[in-house]
Image (spheres, rainbow, N blue to C red):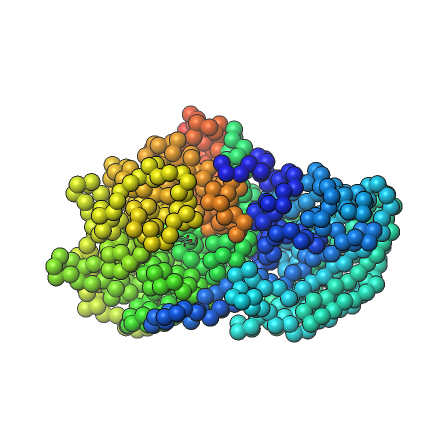
Amino acid sequence: MNQDYIKPDNWSIIEEGFDAERVKSSESLFSIGNGAMGQRANFEETYTGETFQGSYIAGIYYPDKTKVGWWKNGYPEYFAKVLNAPNWIGIDIEINGETFDLDKCTSVKNFRRELNMKEGWYNRSFEATLQNGTDVSINVRRFLSLNLDEAGFIDYKITPLNKDAKIVYKPYIDAGVSNLDANWEEKFWEPLEIKHNENEAFVTARTFKTHFNVTTFMQNSIFSNGKNLNLTTEKVEKSNDKIQFEYAINVAQNELSSIQKIGGYTVSLNHDNTLAAAENVIKEALSRGYDALLNEQIEAWAKIWEMSDITIDGDVEAQQGIRFNIFQLNQTYLGKDSRLNIGPKGFTGEKYGGSTYWDTEAYCIPFYMATKDQQVARNLLTYRYNQLDKAIENAGKLGFTNGAALYPMVTMNGEECHNEWEITFEEIHRNGAIAFAIFNYFRFTGDYSYIPEKGLEVLIAIARFWHQRATYSTHKNQFMILGVTGPNEYENNVNNNFYTNYLAKWCIDYAVEQIEKVKSEYASDYDRIMSKVNLDDNEISKWKKVSDSMYLPFSEEHDVYLQQDGFLDKDLIKVSDLDKSQRPINQKWSWDRILRSPYIKQADVLQGFYFFEDHFSTEQLEKHFDFYEPFTVHESSLSPCVHSIQAAVLGKMDMAYTFYLRTSRLDLDDYNKEVEEGCHITSMAGTWMSIVEGFGGMRVKDDALHFTPRIPEQWEAYSFKINFRNQILKVCVEANETKFSLEGGNELQVFVNGVAITVEPNSLVTV
Ligand code: BGC
């Protein structure tokens, strides 16, 4: 464990003690979000110590012009930036004439942060002594409403402890913000208008280039001993992008004073008139009131937990880990809006730009499919369907024709917005994950309608891409896929990455199967699609030639598929023989040294074995796991979860458990020493998979749920729920038995270790 500052707790993330060195890490870990917006846990008051300011709005981004020395044809025009949005949380505070700043206080005691995941709020409390000798006790609560998702609330309480105090609250909103990753401190927001009345203020600003209009707003109320003083601002300070109010109050020693601030955003994605919409949000928030809204928040989170909670008995750290992951996923994406997606950092940092990676299809869809209404997963698929034209355009820019699609590695709106050539041009396996998700959605939900309605067009366009991307080798008399980057980004421009080739072959076969099925069972959809895509049997038989003769590199000596043609030529020194001081290699080694090394960033061949487990025997899985894992450094957050699942399948429970802790506490324990940049949101869905699919052994085969329950010896019991075809199955695993219960109208047959059992609604079956 790299850090031990997060206190073990079943439902909360807790930090005790103030350490300026940890501020940026805690800002990530204590982030809050509600699917529509989110923010790092920055302090409301002035803070002159090191901090990483971040507040983000779903769907709002900025296209930063790609700048490289040598332009290569096909480069995307821009790299999308997740935009740091205007700040509405700010409240400068003066206490007896001194600006309150934790970095300048002479002492800070009993500092405590709590992120209450059960109820969806974040709290910070402490006692501090200012340089002027005033001791104060401060308690701040903040939440972003799930029900009123354009609004957030702050309740900032101050009690002077050793003398009377004049407290001046100076709440503000500020659109003069920039990104940490901005080039040359460039600003991305253009202020348009500032409006205010006695306690409310509105700053409307527009993003350059993308022209999203956002009204950031605030409303303030000042309280003394819990009573609203109905004060109006004494002063208004305004620049072109910032507005600040001022409320002064005299507070006697040991008396409680507070400011309640409502803030948030209304955006042009949702409103024609963002200013009028902001006024309405404030009205609505005031009419419901802070306490009622906090209660609603608790209820709304209770509903989310009701469906998605996983309990673990006997291991608080494991329990805290999984809840943190489930909580963050729900803070990031709730599936309400099919224009949105799940960014690798969610609302916790800027890194990665763009919101949509293959992470969504490969890792997140299973979680959303099983813990929410199936419409949510369908929305995620539809997101890609809606971007199909852009994916065809994207492939066109690289020279592909005839409706072949290459989905972007990173996107906001369907256009590629990642600009490293070895990823944009070469990490093409992402196309396969998008096809796989369609298969996976049908396998899990049984909802075939998606394929004739939308999915088949995507499958056809992807099959066309693979057909054109393959090269026929007369030397080997087989098809090759040359010059790619597999999931292992620690080698680029390799030939015949097993995962990519296997997936490409599968994509073609699956597309052909679905074309046949739609042709025979959905004739009118078939005609509509065929007239649109202009596909004939001749073209399909050309695809088939590629898939039937796809080359898969294999080593007779090791009896394993090779990660790529040249893998065995590397200096195969295992990770365990590497000096610890060299890790993580991505922070210690030059890129060139990494590329030549045998070290694998994340599951690559094993990612293929994960997707297509049924295509291989357990012995084959074991051989490949034992061959590749020793070279794997797991420096992508997406790595430990897949390994945890496979270790569980192979009965390597100690390893499965270690990988589980690593995936679930990756951020809480900062394994990769980078949590200050933000949390790893998409891999959190992988943590969920490592319990449900790894330890629980859940699979869907032939329209039925199968389980192979296993339990780490560190745990007494664990439980999870699955929404399977609109019935909720609860599974509780203990050392010697597994219990199933069902909410739903119809009995459900499930298989446990291959044996069929029937679960009746509202009754318990113990196996
Ligand atoms: C991983 C990719 C992943 C991306 C975003 C990278 O470090 O190698 O597979 O898509 O992070 O999570």
Estimate the x, y position of residue 396 in percent, counting from the top left.
32, 72
Q: Residue furthest top?
A: 736
Residue at horizontal 58%, vertical 49%?
Answer: 24
In the displayed structure, does residue 741 sit left or right of residue 104?
left
| Residue 338 shows up from this direction | no
Q: How many marks?
A: 0
| Residue 320 shows up from this direction | yes
Front residue (pair 99, 512): 99
Residue at horizontal 64%, vertical 66%?
Answer: 176
Front residue (pair 557, 362): 557
Front residue (pair 598, 36): 598
Q: Height in image: 70 above or below 331? A: below
In the displayed structure, does residue 526 sit left or right of residue 94?
left
Front residue (pair 651, 492): 492
Residue at horizontal 56%, vertical 62%?
Answer: 179
Residue at horizontal 65%, vertical 60%?
Answer: 87
Quadrant position of the C terminus in the picture: top left
Q: Quadrant of residue 526?
A: bottom left
Q: Height in image: 616 above or below 58? A: above
